[in-house]
Structures are given as structure tokens and as C-alpha cells.
Image: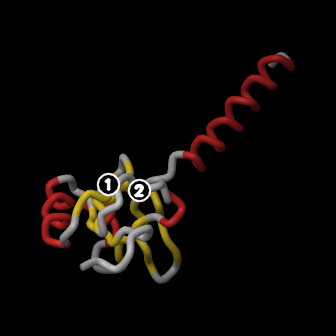
Amino acid sequence: MSIRRAISLGIFAASLLISADIIAAPYCAVFGWGKQCYYYSLSACQQAAGTQGACIINPDEAKAPSGGAPFCVVASYGSNCFYYDAQSCQQAAQSQDAVCAVNPNSGPPY
């Protein structure tokens, strides 16, 4: 193997490691022994967690939410905070295989 090819492979491998950290999944399955943040849909996370764990929003995936309403739909594409009541947020989240969460940048929901 040539030195040039070895360097190219090393750079490629490093870029894969870097991109894996940048592209974090929005959901984590949490178990007593740790967590796995590989899930891009809530249903996939819940299936992986089964009865042995639970699903949470990945804290490392924190993208700035769009919108200023008190409730957000958190999905693989980001957080949309357009919902002023929990019921409409939960309905929207369910139709998108996502989760409804309180907007951390908003005051208390009314």
C-alpha cells in the first residue's frame, strides 16, 4: 500500500468518526447499564428499549428550537415550538412518530 493511499484512508476514517459525532440521533434508549443514542424515530427507540428501558430526547442533539410557543415537537429533523397547548402538540408528535416536550426557552406553559 502506498503512503499516499494510507494517508487517504486515514483521513477518510477520521472524517467518519467526526461525522458520527456531528450527526447525533434525537432519541436515546436508556437502560440501567447506560444509554444508546442511535434512534431517529420514537417508535424505533421504544422498540429497542422494550420493557428493560425507556426513551429520552438526546441531550447531545440539542438543536436550537424554532418557534417560541411553550410546547415543541422534537423529531429527527429538529424541534418545532409552534404549539400553545399540550394536546395539539401531542397530536402532532404522534402523527410524526416524535415526542412533545416543553420548550426550554419559553416561560411556564399557560
Location of the N terminus by quadrant is top right
C-beta proximity under 8 Å, tags 2 and 1: yes
- Locate residue 32, reporting x and y percent: 47, 83
In this picture the colour scheme is secondary structure
Instruction: First in sequence, mark 2 or 1: give its number.
Output: 2
Tell me if 79 is positioned left or right of 23 in this view.
Answer: left
In the rendering, at what x and y percent does residue 40 appear? 36, 52
Q: How far apart, in angstroms, are the residues tagged by discs 2 and 1?
A: 6 Å
Kind of residue at badge 1 = Asn
Residue 37, position in %: x, y?
47, 61
- The answer, for residue 24, to whether it is visible in the render is yes
Q: Viewer-proximal residue, 73 or 31? A: 73
Helix, strand or loop under label 1: strand
Please state if 21 lies on the left or on the right of 48 as rendered.
right
Q: Please state which amino acid type lies under the numbered disc 2.
A: Pro
* Labelled disc at residue 65: 2
Q: Residue at x 77, y 19 (%)?
A: 5
Q: Residues within 10 Å of mark 2 (few under 14, many from 20)?
A: some
Q: Which residue is mark 1?
A: 80
Q: Residue drawn at (34%, 55%), measured in percent from left and top?
A: 67
Q: Is residue 24 left or right of residue 70?
A: right
Q: Which mark is residue 67?
A: none
